[in-house]
Image: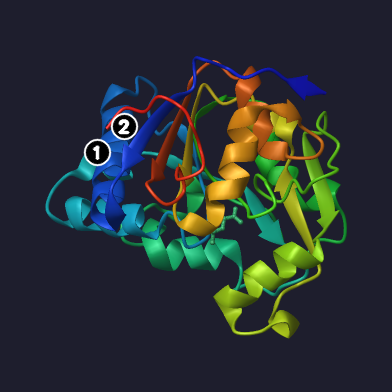
Amino acid sequence: MNAMTNEKIRIIRANGDNDFAEKAFAFFSRKMKEAEEEHPLVILPTGFTPLPLYQKLVQAYVSGEKVLGDFTYLALDEYEGLPQGDYRLFSSWLGREVLDGLEIPQERRIIFDSESASIEQAARHVKAVLSERPVYLAVLGLGNNGHIGFNEPGTDTETEFQRVTLTSETISANAAYWGGMDKVPTHAYTLGLATISKAAETLLLVRGEKKAAILRDVLAGGDIGAVPARYIHAQDNVTIIADDGALSLSKFGFED
Ligand code: PGA
């Protein structure tokens, strides 16, 4: 599959972590206020990139902006084979960083079952919820290798859910979260691009100079198999919030 450069993609440039958090927060809180459905489905990513946003969301929620916690969280991806409660589970991580702070009840956390032996079992709950309602907002991070969720380069772009073998690049990037390659599972479950691309609205967050080359490659468009994040060119409502470092190699018109 190939993607043409999409002039409709909105790029918002941020100057530093505070500005990044402010801009991502403004976007997210506007979307929550505009939501018509009760508890709309929202995908949130793990990773270092969204942490300034999560901190700000929790602060604002605690100060009284209760609308920020009105959503249903839908998992983007999860490691395979970790026991319930393991600190490395993405559901645990997002709980610590944002979902607990926003008081999202367990029944509004739609997650993969890491202990399942197959993608069919692991994604059963996620799939059942998605068959009833669409994703309102997909907030995503960008992998160093262009992955979205755990849709790694070479992924089948038509798949709805999949079990993946993590690339060595992703395992070493994830080692930074858990203090060593040996702590990173080798397999994972993820929503496929066919599911992620059905979100009504997409917010891609990119932070740091080490993402500059991959963000340039995403924005240039081209083969989605090679750089999965290029799928955004075929989407209607995409906003990228990226900092100066991440945009340092891209020659696009930005909004500040
Ligand atoms: P990062 O991860 O935010 O820690 O850079 C992003 C990703 O791998 O999707």
Residue 66, horizontal then vertical, whole percent:
21, 44
Q: Residue at x 20, y 58 (%)?
A: 59
> What distance separates the C-alpha of mark 1 from that of mark 2?
7 Å
**Badge 2: how crowded within 10 Å, few (<14), some, or many (20+)?**
many
Q: Nearer the viewer, residue 17 or 36?
A: 17
- Are circles 1 and 2 on residues that touch, CB within 8 Å? yes
Is the shortest distance between ligand 1 and the CB of mark 1 under 8 Å? no
Q: Nearer the viewer, residue 51 or 10?
A: 10
Give the amino acid type for the residue marked by disc 2 in the picture: Met
Q: Quadrant of residue 222?
A: top right
Where 9 falls versus 42 (above or below)? Answer: above
- Is residue 228 among what the camera can see? yes
Q: Residue at x 78, y 70 (%)?
A: 81
Residue 88, horizontal then vertical, whole percent:
60, 73
- Quadrant containing the C terminus is top left
Give the amino acid type for the residue marked by disc 1 in the picture: Val
Q: Quadrant of ligand 1?
A: bottom right
Q: Nearer the viewer, residue 180 or 13?
A: 13
Q: Nearer the viewer, residue 72 or 231?
A: 231
Q: Residue at x 45, y 56 (%)?
A: 208
Q: Please tell me the numbered disc located at residue 32.
A: 2
Residue that label 1 marks: 67
Residue 218, horizontal then vertical, whole percent:
63, 36
Q: Judge from the rendering whether residue 161 lies leftward or rightward of residue 17; answer left or right.
A: right
Residue 166, horizontal then vertical, whole percent:
80, 61
